[in-house]
Image (spheres, coloured by chain):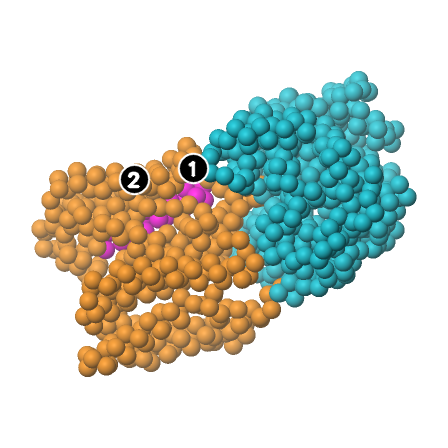
Amino acid sequence: MIASSPWRQSLGLRQAGVFYALLVLLGILAALAASRGLPPYLAPSNLGNIAYQASLVGIMAVAMTVMLITGAFDLSVASVAALAAAVLVGLAGQIGFVPALGCALCTAAMVGIFNGVIVELVGINAFIVTLGTLTAVRGLVLVVTDGRSLMVEDPQVLAQMLAFESTRVPLFWALLVLGAVALGLATLRRAWGIALAGAALLGLAAVLGRGFTVAAPVVYLIAFTAAAWFVMERTVMGRRLQAVGGNAEAARLSGIDVRAYRIGAFVLSSLAAGFAGCLFGCRLGAINPTAMQGAELTVIAAAILGGTSLYGGAGSVIKTVAGALILFTLTNGFNILNLGANYQGIIEGAVIIIAAAIYTLGNRKRGETR
Amino acid sequence: MVSASPLLALRHIAKRYPNGTQALVDASLEIHAGAVHGLLGANGAGKSTLIAILSGATAATQGEIVWQGQPVRWRRPADARRSGVSTLYQHIPLVPTLSALENILLDAPGWQRHDRDQRARARAVVAQLGDPFALDALVAHLPISARQMVGIAQSLLGGAQVLVMDEPTASLGASDRAAVYDVVRRLAYQEGKAIVFVSHFLDEILALTDHVTILRDGCDVLHRATGDLDEASLAATISGRDVAMLARRQRQVGTEVRLAVRDLASPAGLSPTTFDLRAGEILGIAGMLGAGRSELLHAVFGADPQARGQVLVDGVPVVAETGAAVAAGLALVPEDRKRQGFVAGFSIADNIALPGTGWRIDRAAERQRADHAIATLGIKADDAQRPVGTLSGGNAQKVVLAKWLTPQTRVLLLDEPTAGIDIGARIDILEQVRRLADQGLAVVLVSSDFAELLALSDRILVMRDGAVVACADPARTSEIDLTLLASGTAPPCDGAPA
């Protein structure tokens, strides 16, 4: 029997630990900044900056979480992102920004279909297949770019791309309205979780102030996360995805097309990676063939920090975003506070292992085997 | 044969888990060398906990363990094994990629991988068991029955004097069971070992054991010599109430053909099979393990991609794919609940709603459905949000059944729905099946329990080696007839159906 109430459980270390960790980390860095006489670490501009830095990995990590929930694995995301960026930058000058974006996303989706079909229909382990595409797609990027940096020459197209990536979006009123709506819903339904979220949004609005703006990728991340959360938590499709990872055979014998859902997850993962890659390409209007190399590990680390099970069946996209924020807060903190970039890897690695240990021990306490 | 003082005695054992569950209240057990001791109890009666305490996997909170007259405390399974108590679980932990010999020697001392003396000793032990497997065969290639023998050999080589066997026959067919009985008798009466034999099968407990202990609600409620007992008294003591096994009842069967199966065959082990099933009819499928019963149900349900042939529901052909089968109103309760039936991490409500279609989840409606299932099927759970993985076997099976209790379901395929389930839950499930059929559902019931088949079915098909070999009228057939038909020692009676 679980002794504590669901309400207390949902605020426990196992359930909400990643949010606490993020708050504690921000607190420590703020204290460090204050003690060294640096400008306040928690300034709205810096918080917006962290979110911006985390946005690309965050978008990929949300899709990776869905992927991991279905019980599969995708190592190829960073290469796919680079390929999409190369396609976008390479084509935008000739066919215009929007058609090039479409081509880039289609290219990414093709890689996803390839991964999914090989894994599901041939039956090779996803780790091996995507390790293969990780290497091969990076090779394809080299072929496409001929090993050199590409850039968009047409100033009009370049302006469009920069607008897509760097437009500042005011968030104050959005936060206020969303917070109020959540509080209203909470009083109607007497739901504590929604009330807490609403209060957090209003608090955030108060802290950040009226002039707060973020770059467009943060808004894309928020929108994508919200959509993924809704699908996973509130729709039959979400439950089916989770059932596929929780017990594929039981799902199949309940009439669920397990393969279609798994292939769908691969396509989603590649599409999200492609979109993130396009944002990366838009940032500078240019791409070099080694762009985002190694980012797949950060993406997976974010999902693990968020408590996603590598065995499938469990995970939360919102906690994954919190995990990505932790990783980029660390990076940002080391840079701003000049803490010695040499130690950054050690700290990040330790954070990941400690998080995984907390989740594993938490599960064991509840009598689960993994 | 039985010595006066017990080899191992558990006295007034109580066990309370840290989460507050009182698994054992006051249980005692005496085990003698050279005898087979049966341990019985419904699911949740405390058998598993008692075995865990015997094996040293968990410690009792009260009571004492006396080993050869000395009180002992076992903290780890290794402590119990070193004393000479070895536990064989239903799923024996063997390394499939090593040979039988290397598995047997897995916990043997020494540093050499291929030691001639050890090989000789292992060979001697395996010979004691009647050489049921080749020493150098890979465990992955051995059938389940042989793997059990590997486990037994491992225990014997480790110097076991007490062998605790947890449902060793649950997943075996008739001939393999007989082999297990042989070994058990040989070990007890020739080698003088003490055997604790845990089983759900009352007939084998009666045939095999010398003494019986029955647990109920964490207490030992009966210690008796087996000779003084019969199946009815065992069943009554286990459940704590007098259960007449479900009585046969003449039923009204509809006239319209609901399910038509035409020349359905599969390389997985099913010869072309043809039969009809009418609305409200319960069709029993009798057969030994491996006779093709599960293969037939999987092929009908579209879960076997290699199957060929036609399945029609109400005259409409069904595409061979599980999603299409569910949409056509077919429903399968699979044999292996844990692996095929439910998602352990999902709540009762989520598991029941799993086959549901549509796109939005209506939590309130699903909760209501789950609460309804908990009430009507008698699922013992305090809350519909409870993960199914934490329920006992019988209750989990009721959840798997509840999954399909929708107006959409027209044909219910049940694969051993009562295997490994205590008598109370078993009767709940069977009565529910009969009620569903009375409401017009067509039911195919596969069961190894022939009494159950005879009580429930309107017609019985007997399968052997992947083919339907006979059709029996349950009103004019006995359990013995069915056994003879299924095990191939009698010629087909009425001839196979057209």
The secondary structure type at the circle numbered 2 is: helix
Residue A191 magenta-highlighted: no
Q: Are marks 2 and 1 on the same chain?
A: yes
Q: Which residue is mark 1?
A: A120
Q: Is any atom of residue B371 visible in this view? A: no
Find the magenta span and give its range.
A260-279
Tell which subunit mark 1 falls on. A
Please report whichever mark, 2 or 1, sits nearer to the chain's N-terminal start: 1
Distance between mark 2 and mark 1 Cα atoms? 15 Å
B58 left or right of A40?
right
Q: Is any atom of residue A8 visible in this view? A: yes
Q: Is residue B267 above or below residue A354?
A: above
x and y percent of residue B424 in the render? Answer: 78, 51
Instruction: Give the residue drawn at x 40%, y 35%.
Output: A124
Q: Amino acid at mark 2?
A: Thr
Instruction: Give the residue drawn at x 65%, y 27%.
Output: B127
Q: Which chain is cyan?
A: B
A340 left or right of A329?
left
Mark seen at residue B77? none
The secondary structure type at the circle numbered 1 is: helix
Q: Which residue is mark 2?
A: A133
Residue A278 magenta-highlighted: yes
Instruction: Give the residue drawn at x 20%, y 72%.
Output: A337
Of B382 and B40, nearer the camera is: B40
**Quarter of the rendering containing residue B445:** top right
Q: Which chain is orange?
A: A
x and y percent of residue A250 in the render? Answer: 57, 44
x and y percent of residue A319 in the render? Answer: 40, 62
Of A178 and A132, nearer the camera is: A132
Quadrant (top left/top right/bottom left/bottom right) for the C terminus of chain B: top right
